Each structure stands twice: as C-alpha cells, then as structure tokens.
Image (cartoon, rainbow, N blue to C red):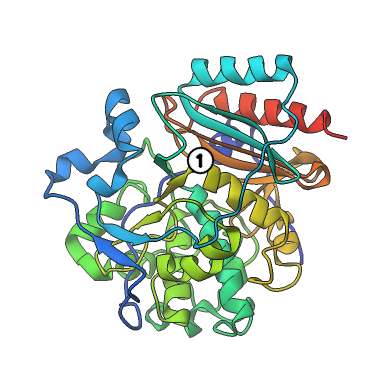
C-alpha cells in the first residue's frame, strides 16, 4: 500500500493527535430493524442547548461522561456471556506506579489500566470513577468502526477495500466521492475538502449539528455530498470525522444492521467485554461511526488486547497489522495514520479521543495502556504527550 506523506508542524501534529468528537449525521436508513440484543434507549427530553458537549462545564463533563445514555439516545448491547478474565500480573515498579498516580491527579484522568501479556499490572481510578462505571469514548470509537469494517470484509459483505464508496452509499454518486474507494475514506485520503477546526463556527465539523437540525435522517448525505474535491483521491490526508461517519453508514448498509448490533458479535463477545456497551444513534436510527460509545475501562483494555491478538478470526488474517500500518506519514515525526488508528514511533499504535481517552498498544512488548479522562481542554494540552511518554517508558521496562 502506497504511503501519503503529510507535512505538518509540531502544533498541528499535536492537535491532530488529540482526536476529535463526532456529531450526529449518517443518513440513509439501516437495512432492517435492530435485532433484540440491540435495545434502543431514550433519555428524558432535554433542552438542545444542554446537549452541546464541547461547552459543558468541567463538573458537567465529569458527571455526564459516565452517563451519556441519560443524555443521548443510543443502542445498548449486553456484555459477553463469557467475559475475558483479566488476571493480575506482577505490578509495575513503585516508581512507575507513583508516576501514573501523579499524572492521573494532575490531568483529571478517570482511570488507567495497563496490561502486559493480557494481565493487569496496574489499575487506578480518579474523579469518583469505579470499575463498574462506563465512560464515553469520543473518537476512540473510530477504531471500533474500523474493526467492524474489517469484519464486514471478512464476512463477505464488503467485497474489497478498493471498491468505490458509491457501491455501498449510492446517494454519494455524482459528488466529490465519485471514484473514491473504501480504503481511501478508511485512511482519510479521499481528497475531499473538510475543515475539522473546532474553534471555527463555520468549520464543517461545527456545522454537523446544523445539518442534523435541517435535514434530520438525511443529514450526513446532505453535508458530505455537497463537499468539493481539493485533491486527487489518495493524494492528500485530512482528518475528517464526517468520513468516519460515512464508514459507519457504509458498514451498516452492507451488513444490514446497526454498528452496535454488529459489534455485539464481532467485538463485545469475542473480546470478552465484561460490561454492556452503549453507542449513540443519529436521527436515522443508526449508530455514529465517528464517536460516542461508552464502555468500562477494563473493556477499553480488552479491546486493545483483542487488537493485539489479531482479532480472533473476526477480521481477515493480518487485518490489524494492515490497519495499524501507517498509510499516511506525518513528515519524519514517526507518527502517522492507518485505517482509523493512529500510528506512533517504534511500531506502537492506538485509538484516541478528545478530553482524554486512549488505547495505546506496544505489540513488541505485549503492552496495552488504556486511559479515560476529563481533561480541561478537548484537544488536551501537554497531557497527550505526557501519557504517551509514560506508556512508552512502561513498555521499555518489559522484557
């Protein structure tokens, strides 16, 4: 697979690595009703102004990030019948434990779990969080959606990543997505113009909710098919939450069920999740591909272990090696992007979202480093780099 090199400054790179939140916005109905295991939950009626997540106060985030099902509609799917046991391993050194605890306190992190060889070597909580609580994912969900894309390929619902996107989303025919492949939206190299700037009220990502208000179930197609092309497909990388929502729509159209329902058999059960999974829905009743599933900290770690072990036959052979190989290189920084996974120096990779959620994996050391949080700023400050440095330091101590 050819690589795309994206030259970015250190500041831009930091912002890109912060991840982002998705918004409501797939369109086109899901083929068929959700199966009984995906139960639709409806919260009490809320003032729309109180649903602007990016503008919640610190205390509101700490309370609501663990209870998103009380604020947004979504699908609930039950935990695995046979959860994967996470036994205790040899604890980290006292020095590393102290470093983790200090960073948890200083960064308003809600929990950290470290696995080595699938065993828990460190588990810690903050902000009143406990092992049974769930926490929202934001863009960590993108890597779940990527995994479901792989499962759809394995199951034969998607013939090839080199198929045109319009084969699965016919409503994009005649738009800038004409001639764009599934692989190119998976790597965000469609060449379609998109502005992901959260500080700009006129950015595409900021307008997603406006399209939802105006177009309802047709919001994502209305927005995405109107975008212009700025580069040839495959030639330029631009981070686009809207395209991950397209992947979610594409997968749902291909498999004929919501992402949450498909995730039950393709992630929750084989990865052995101990808690139920909640995944927000958009106005058409499908799940939001780019955002917004809620699970326990231990299940963030189980997802990482599932990826580390290759997906237990749920995805094509070698899928995770391919999905987490940098299709896009950010200059010579060692950072890059694969199929909705961020890639890091020395072969590490991970999933990450705003306000401090991440799953970071070090395959050569068999290490999974998962954390969830309520950082002060959506894109973070120094925290992302501090956690990446600390996780790398832990990995170097493993024989």
Write the residue at 71% across / 15% down: 94
| Element on which disc 1 rests | helix
Write the residue at 13% across / 49% down: 44
Relative placement, left or right, of 310 versus 224 is right
Pick the front one: 355 or 228: 355
Pick the front one: 193 or 312: 312
Q: Residue 276: in sight, yes or no?
A: yes
**Percent of width and height locating residue 27:** 32, 71
In the image, residue 291 sits, relative to residue 223, either above or below, namely: above
Q: Quadrant of residue 200?
A: top left
Q: Quadrant of residue 2?
A: bottom right
Write the residue at 37% across / 35% down: 199
**Percent of width and height locating residue 393:** 76, 26
Indicate the quadrant containing the N terminus: top left, top right, bottom left or bottom right. Answer: bottom right
Q: Residue furthest right?
A: 399
In the image, residue 375 sits, relative to residue 139, either above or below, namely: above
In the image, residue 347 sits, relative to residue 226, either above or below, namely: above
Q: Quadrant of residue 339?
A: bottom right
Relative placement, left or right, of 355 versus 62 is right
Residue that label 1 marks:
297
**Percent of width and height locating residue 31:** 35, 83
Q: Residues within 10 Å of mark 1 (few under 14, many from 20)?
A: many
Indicate the quadrant containing the C terminus: top left, top right, bottom left or bottom right. Answer: top right
Relative placement, left or right, of 366 versus 194 is right
Write the residue at 61% across / 85% down: 159
**Percent of width and height locating residue 127:** 40, 24
């Amino acid at each position: 697979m050819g690589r795309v090199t994206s030259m970015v400054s250190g500041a831009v790179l930091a912002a890109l690595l912060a991840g982002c939140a998705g918004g409501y916005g797939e369109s086109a109905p899901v083929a068929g009703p959700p199966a009984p295991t995906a139960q639709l939950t409806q919260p009490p009626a809320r003032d729309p102004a109180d649903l602007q997540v990016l503008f919640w106060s610190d205390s509101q985030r700490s309370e609501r990030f663990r209870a998103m099902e009380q604020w947004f509609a979504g699908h609930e799917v039950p935990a695995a019948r046979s959860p994967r046991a996470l036994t205790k391993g040899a604890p980290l050194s006292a020095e590393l434990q102290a470093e983790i605890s200090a960073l948890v306190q200083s960064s308003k992190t809600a929990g950290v779990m470290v696995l080595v060889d699938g065993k828990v070597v460190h588990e810690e909580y903050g902000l009143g969080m406990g092992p049974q609580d769930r926490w929202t994912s934001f863009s960590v969900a993108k890597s779940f959606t990527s995994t479901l894309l792989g499962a759809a390929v394995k199951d034969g619902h998607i013939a090839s990543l080199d198929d045109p996107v319009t084969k699965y989303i016919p409503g994009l025919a005649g738009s800038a997505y004409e001639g764009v492949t599934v692989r190119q939206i998976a790597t965000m190299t469609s060449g379609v113009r998109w502005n992901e700037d959260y500080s700009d009220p006129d950015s595409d990502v900021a307008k997603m909710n406006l399209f939802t208000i105006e177009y309802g179930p047709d919001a994502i197609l209305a927005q995405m098919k109107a975008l212009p092309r700025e580069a040839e497909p495959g030639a330029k990388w631009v981070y686009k939450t809207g395209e991950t929502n397209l992947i979610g729509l594409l997968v749902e159209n291909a498999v004929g069920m919501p992402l949450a329902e498909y995730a039950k058999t393709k992630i929750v059960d084989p990865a052995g999740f101990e808690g139920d999974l909640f995944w927000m829905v958009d106005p058409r009743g499908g799940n939001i591909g780019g955002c917004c599933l809620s699970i326990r900290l231990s299940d963030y770690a189980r997802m990482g272990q599932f990826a580390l072990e290759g997906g237990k036959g749920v995805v094509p052979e070698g899928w995770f090696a391919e999905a987490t190989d940098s299709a896009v290189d950010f200059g010579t920084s060692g950072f890059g992007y694969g199929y909705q996974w961020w890639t890091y120096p020395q072969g590490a990779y991970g999933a990450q979202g705003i306000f401090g959620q991440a799953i970071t994996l070090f395959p050569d050391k068999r290490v999974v480093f998962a954390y969830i949080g309520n950082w002060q700023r959506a894109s973070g400050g120094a925290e992302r780099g501090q956690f990446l440095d600390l996780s790398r330091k832990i990995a170097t101590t493993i024989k």
